[in-house]
Image: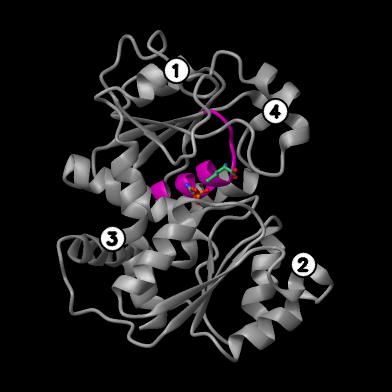
Amino acid sequence: MNADDFLDIDDVSADELDALLALAADLKAGDNDTRLTDQTLGMLFEKPSTRTRISFETGMTQLGGHAIFMGPDDIQLGHGEPLKDTARAMGRYVDGIMARLFDHEDAETLAEYADVPVINGLTDDAHPCQTLADLLTIREQFGGLDDVRVAWVGDGNNVGQSFAVGCALAGVDLAVATPANYAMDDAVIDRADELGEAPEVYTDPAAAIDGADVIYTDVWVSMGEEDKREEKLAAFDGFQLNDELLADTDATVMHCLPAHRGEEITDSVIESDRSIVWEQAENRLHAQKALLVELLG
Ligand code: CP
Ligand code: NVA
């Protein structure tokens, strides 16, 4: 990998993305030669996490290294120390930093001041590690990424934005349906366009899922948006992945999790045979191990 940090999915080139996914598949298949012996990953979390925390920590252990979890109250960052000071001190101890932060600019500040690779474990704008796992999952399920058409249905949020750029990089056909007021940022659509594959954009879920092999959704109310809950639930009426919306398609269903069952997806759909959400969750581990090897190895 050319880039020192992984803050956005397009910090890797199309070829590097392809190589990362291939390495992830090898690691998943049992390649035990690739090691990060004695290396330490510092993990900073401003928001909660199940999958990101556990998969990074387990991944470092499996690679022969170690990870340190730091929640908002565990270190001086939550008690007045500036982020740039935390970054410089941490960089003197650990071999890499993974951070889940609210403000994407804070991830950039961390990367600027820390002398070690910084990985974005989710910001308000992006979730590139999720995209690696998502593309690995599609690649496995369909035997490749060519000729796969995906529909993103729901909020134009962090997970969707990284996925849209990732699809453009990987050459995956994407249609997006969001309520008009919750579209992806123009910069994201422009970036996907520059990479050669702007998504088709709709406000009607039925139009987006027409002809899709995969339908992907995420929560309507992301972490930090709790005060917008009522207005968002009203705006997303009609966007739920339920048996009625999916009646005429046999498309596979993806969700990055955690799911809010009864909001963006029904219990019936997430528990159905078309759902590959557990494969997707597992692939966080394999995809991130590949990323750690590339960045820290
Ligand atoms: N998908 C994802 O990032 O899950 P967590 O919030 O549990 O880490
Ligand atoms: N969009 C969700 C993703 C959680 C993994 C959030 O930011 O809360």
Q: Point out the tag, 1 or 3, that comes first from the N-terminus.
A: 3
> In the rendering, at what x and y percent does residue 62 appear?
29, 71
Q: Amino acid at mark 1?
A: Ala
Position of the N terminus, as image quadrant, is bottom left
On the image, the x and y values in percent for residue 27 come to 22, 66
Q: Mark 4 or mark 2, which has the lower sequence index?
A: 2
Identify the mark at residue 207; answer none if there is no mark: 1
Marks 4 and 3: in contact by CB < 8 Å?
A: no
Residue at 49% over, 85% down: 95
* Mark 2, residue position: 78
Q: Amino acid at mark 2?
A: Gly
Q: Secondary structure at mark 3?
A: helix
Mark 4 lies on residue: 181
Residue sitting nearer the eye, 83 or 179: 83
Q: Which residues are magenta?
A: 154-167
Judged from the image, the secondary structure of the residue bearing numbered disc 2 is helix
Disc 1 residue crowd, few under 14, some 14–19, many 20+, Cα 10 Å:
some
Q: CA distance from mark 4 to mark 2?
A: 33 Å
* Circle nearer the viewer, 2 or 3: 2
Is the C-beta of the residue carrying label 1 under 8 Å from the nearest atom of ligand 2?
no
Residue 231 shown in magenta: no
